[in-house]
Image (tube, rainbow, N blue to C red):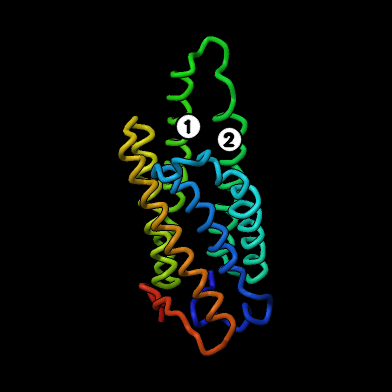
Amino acid sequence: MSVNDDRSALSVAAIADPAPLGLAAFALTTFLLGAASAGWMTKGTTNAFLGYAFAYGGLCQLLAGMWEFRNRNVFGATAFSSYGGFWIGFGLWFLLVAEHAPPAGMTATAYGAAVQHDIGWIFLAFAIFNAYMLLWSTQVNIAVFAVFLTLELTEIFVFIGKLGGNANIAKVGGYIAVVTAVVAWYTSAAGVANGMGGRLRVPVGKPILGPRI
């Protein structure tokens, strides 16, 4: 991710910075799922995230990851490609499993509990991945670090709540997901503003761990 003010000459010469797109795609889809998990969509289907899991958080974020490969940005390429794959995979799981009728011999209640455990395992797996990405984000900037920190907390609360059968803990994960989305939107906005080279500059902070001397 090269949303900081000090993008390398190679990145500038290659293509426009794809990080703002990837962050915006991640933010919007995370916001929709987080709002549903927090119980805010009382007059909606709660599935507003699904189409965007494929088209925006999934496809657009995956494309951002591919462009980061073009920019030789291993962190951005890994992060955006992985979370683009996460949203596509989560959307497919939702359609093929969560929305599927219970298999023969399993009650709807038992199947619903199994679905919740599936979500717990999915978020546990991504919490593991996100843990080392959080560590490496300390070498990018404060804004990117904040995205991965709030995302890690989201995933932890969701997997604990889902695997433990505690809806309140999972709901807290929904609240934190909304915060994650807001932080990601801010970082995306900073990338757009700073990448334009105009008068308006948005601070993103310096890396917590600077380069080795």
Spot the residue most to the front. Answer: 43
Residue 78: x and y in percent read 56, 58
Kind of residue at badge 2:
Trp
Q: Is residue 150 left or right of residue 16?
A: left
Q: Is residue 115 above or below residue 205?
A: above
Counting labels gives: 2
Residue 40: x and y in percent read 41, 45
Instruction: Residue at 37%, 32% (x, y): give it.
Output: 163
Instruction: Residue at 65%, 75% (x, y): give it.
Output: 16
**Residue 96 lies in what quarter of the image?**
top right
Is 182 or 26 nearer to us in this picture? 182
Residue 195: x and y in percent read 57, 80
Whole-Å distance between the Cαs marked 2 and 1?
A: 9 Å
Q: Kindly tell me whether residue 78 is visible in this rendering.
A: no
What residue is disc 1 on? 118
Instruction: Residue at 54%, 73% (x, y): give it.
Output: 2
Kind of residue at badge 1:
Asp
Q: Secondary structure at mark 2?
A: helix
For residue 93, which numbered disc appears in the image?
2
Name the image quarter holding the C terminus: bottom left
Is 85 or 186 nearer to us in this picture? 186
**Residue 170 lies in what quarter of the image?**
top left
The answer to whether marks 2 and 1 mark residues whose Cβ atoms lie closer than 8 Å is yes
- Of labels 2 and 1, earlier in sequence is 2
For label 1, count other residues whose C-alpha is less than 10 Å away and answer few (under 14), some (14-19) or many (20+): some
Q: Is residue 20 left or right of residue 154?
A: right
For label 2, count other residues whose C-alpha is less than 10 Å away and answer few (under 14), some (14-19) or many (20+): some
Is 137 or 192 nearer to us in this picture? 192
Q: Kindly tell me whether residue 184 is visible in this rendering.
A: yes
Residue 29: x and y in percent read 53, 52
**Residue 139 lies in what quarter of the image?**
bottom left
